[in-house]
């Protein structure tokens, strides 16, 4: 089975590199490096790319007019080559903004098995049926962003030596993330996001050095398994915008390096586990739009690195536990949309605009007045007293500003009209 295709492949390679040497007669390219010791600089540099790889690039519609080893553009097509002699080889290739009818011939892909990094950005061409084995095994990094139309878990799972996998904005058909990643033991960073991926968060982990895990914006269901704690190096965990349910496992507190955690937009319920107090490296915590309940844990305010905290749209209860200096220290803080939560107005000013109700003396939320606009003054004077207890400012005052202005203008205008009428009458009387 194996020998005929590979000998055919060799033949094609020989023929095509021969064709290339003839076709490229204008450039002094030669398979033998000793034959042309000092060719002109530009030609020399481009001609040092392995001719098979140059043909492969050309057959994929990749621009090769300039030195194909020197395309460092950050947003477009890009390459990187090694320094091997006599021919350099591609180690990194990015195809960007390709036309949808571009073809990726298997022969071309075979010739690219020196690649360690391959990425597609906005290249909506059909995915090749399978990547040739040598290329699949050689890749350390694979990225597919709004490209290749549709991928399967099995297709991706063949890229066993990956350390970095990123698939964003491409539908991925698989029974779950486990199919994709369970054979990739060297993974350090995984993003499979906006792929409509179904299934559950994996229970068994094989890539124990994982640092970034991003499975956001998919259709994942079920609970977050407590076995996630085996990923002891995890710094980023983004499971937002799925359909995850159940409670957060206590073992989450074992992820000691966690810096960025988002569980937002799921159906996770129950309390925030006490074990989270051990996550002292947290910078970014997003629990928004779930069904977390119980009280907001005070320990969050002892997290020294924390800059972003979003607790909005949950079922948190009781008295808001943080003081104003903690809230102001955060770059982003949100807690609105928790109807059973309230703040103690003798300790916090309404100017913090937390978006939650005040507590009554029993620590229950005071229901908002039926209609603020019709019962103006008594309500505002309450808020006003709050403001005085704070450190002064414009919160309540600015609310009165616009209406006073409107009133002033109205009075001024009517005086003016009155004056005109008066003058007209006066002139008639005089005339
Ligand atoms: C980038 O490469 C793709 C695929 O080879 C090609 O279709 C596209 O025209 C190239 N873009 C530029 C700006 O050269
Ligand atoms: C992964 O890389 C190793 C050596 O770096 C190689 O021996 C192995 O064949 C590769 N795996 C695959 C699936 O190609
Ligand atoms: C996911 O499915 C929805 C609804 O079927 C569809 O609108 C959306 O385009 C899909 N997303 C991707 C990345 O295919
Ligand atoms: C996860 O991936 C999405 C891409 O869809 C990105 O927007 C988001 O910022 C990533 N999350 C983290 C924590 O980097
Ligand atoms: C955390 O992830 C969010 C996206 O979910 C991103 O916007 C933010 O910059 C990340 N913060 C850090 C500190 O990595
Ligand atoms: C939180 O919700 C769970 C159900 O999701 C319920 O069993 C539990 O009693 C609630 N806890 C509090 C403090 O309300
Ligand atoms: C506010 O809370 C933090 C953390 O709980 C605490 O360290 C700090 O001393 C408090 N500040 C004031 C002014 O009470
Ligand atoms: C609000 O704070 C004051 C002063 O710290 C305290 O005496 C009172 O009991 C608190 N009220 C509630 C409902 O927690």
Image (tube, rainbow, N blue to C red):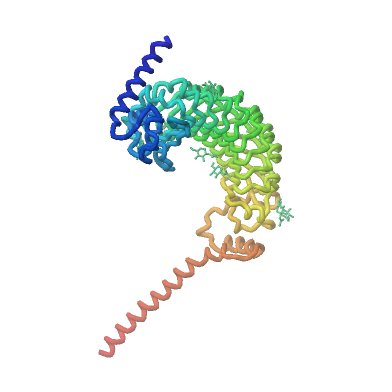
Label total for image: 0
Compare residues 82 and 141 and report the one nearer the observer. Answer: 82
The extreme left residue here reads 431
Task: Using the image, determine if residue 346 lies above or below residue 281.
Answer: below
Residue under the image location 50 percent in, 31 percent down: 141
Q: Position of residue 146 (x, y in %)?
A: 41, 34
Compare residues 279 and 370 and report the one nearer the observer. Answer: 279
Regarding ligand 3, which quadrant of the image does it lie in?
A: top left
Compare residues 1 and 184 and report the one nearer the observer. Answer: 1
Task: Using the image, determine if residue 393 lies above or below residue 250.
Answer: below
Q: Position of residue 322 (x, y in %)?
A: 67, 50
Task: Using the image, determine if residue 44 lies above or below residue 323.
Answer: above
Q: Position of residue 420 (x, y in %)?
A: 33, 80
Residue under the image location 35 percent in, 24 percent down: 105
The extreme bottom residue here reads 430
For the C terminus, the quadrant is bottom left
For the N terminus, the quadrant is top left
Residue under the image location 60 percent in, 32 percent down: 210
Task: Using the image, determine if residue 429 lies above or below residue 60.
Answer: below
Residue 125 visible = no
Q: Is residue 160 left or right of residue 34?
A: right
Based on the displayed image, in which of its 4 quarters is residue 150 positioned?
top left
Compare residues 387 and 138 and report the one nearer the observer. Answer: 138
Q: Position of residue 40 (x, y in %)?
A: 36, 40
Residue 55 visible = yes
């Amino acid at each position: 089975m194996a020998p005929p295709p590979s000998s055919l492949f060799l033949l094609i390679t020989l023929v095509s590199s021969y064709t290339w040497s003839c076709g490229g007669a204008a450039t002094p390219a030669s398979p033998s490096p000793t034959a042309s010791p000092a060719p002109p600089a530009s030609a020399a540099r481009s001609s040092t790319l392995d001719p098979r790889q140059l043909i492969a690039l050309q057959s994929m519609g990749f621009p090769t007019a300039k030195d194909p080893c020197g395309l460092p553009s950050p947003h477009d097509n890009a390459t990187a080559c090694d320094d091997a002699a006599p021919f350099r080889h591609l180690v990194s290739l990015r195809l960007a903004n390709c036309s949808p009818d571009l073809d990726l011939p298997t022969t071309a892909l075979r010739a690219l098995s020196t690649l360690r990094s391959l990425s597609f950005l906005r290249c909506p061409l059909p995915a090749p049926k399978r990547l040739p084995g040598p290329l699949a095994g050689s890749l350390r990094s694979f990225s597919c962003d709004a490209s290749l139309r549709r991928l399967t878990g099995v297709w991706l799972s063949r890229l066993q030596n990956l350390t970095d996998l990123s698939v964003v904005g491409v539908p991925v058909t698989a029974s779950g993330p486990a199919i994709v990643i369970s054979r990739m033991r060297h993974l350090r960073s995984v993003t499979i996001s906006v792929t409509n991926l179904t299934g559950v968060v994996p229970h068994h982990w094989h890539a124990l050095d994982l640092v970034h895990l991003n499975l956001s914006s998919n259709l994942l269901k079920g609970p977050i398994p407590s076995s996630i704690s085996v990923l002891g190096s995890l710094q980023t965990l983004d499971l937002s915008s799925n359909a995850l349910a159940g409670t957060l496992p206590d073992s989450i507190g074992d992820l000691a390096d966690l810096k960025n955690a988002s569980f937002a937009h799921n159906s996770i319920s129950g309390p925030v586990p006490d074990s989270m107090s051990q996550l002292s490296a947290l910078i970014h915590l997003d629990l928004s739009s779930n069904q977390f309940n119980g009280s907001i844990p005070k320990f969050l305010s002892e997290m020294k690195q924390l800059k972003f905290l979003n607790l909005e749209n949950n079922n948190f209860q009781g008295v808001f536990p943080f003081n104003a200096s903690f809230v102001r220290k955060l770059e982003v803080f949100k807690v609105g949309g928790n109807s059973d939560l309230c703040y103690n107005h003798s300790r916090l000013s309404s100017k913090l605009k937390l978006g939650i109700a005040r507590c009554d003396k029993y620590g229950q939320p005071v229901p908002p007045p039926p209609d603020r606009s019709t019962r103006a003054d008594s309500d505002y004077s309450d808020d006003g007293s709050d403001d005085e207890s704070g450190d002064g400012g414009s919160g309540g005052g600015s609310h009165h500003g616009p209406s006073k202005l409107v009133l002033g203008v109205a009075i001024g205008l009517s005086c003016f009209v009155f004056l005109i009428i008066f003058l007209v009458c006066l002139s008639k009387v005089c005339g």
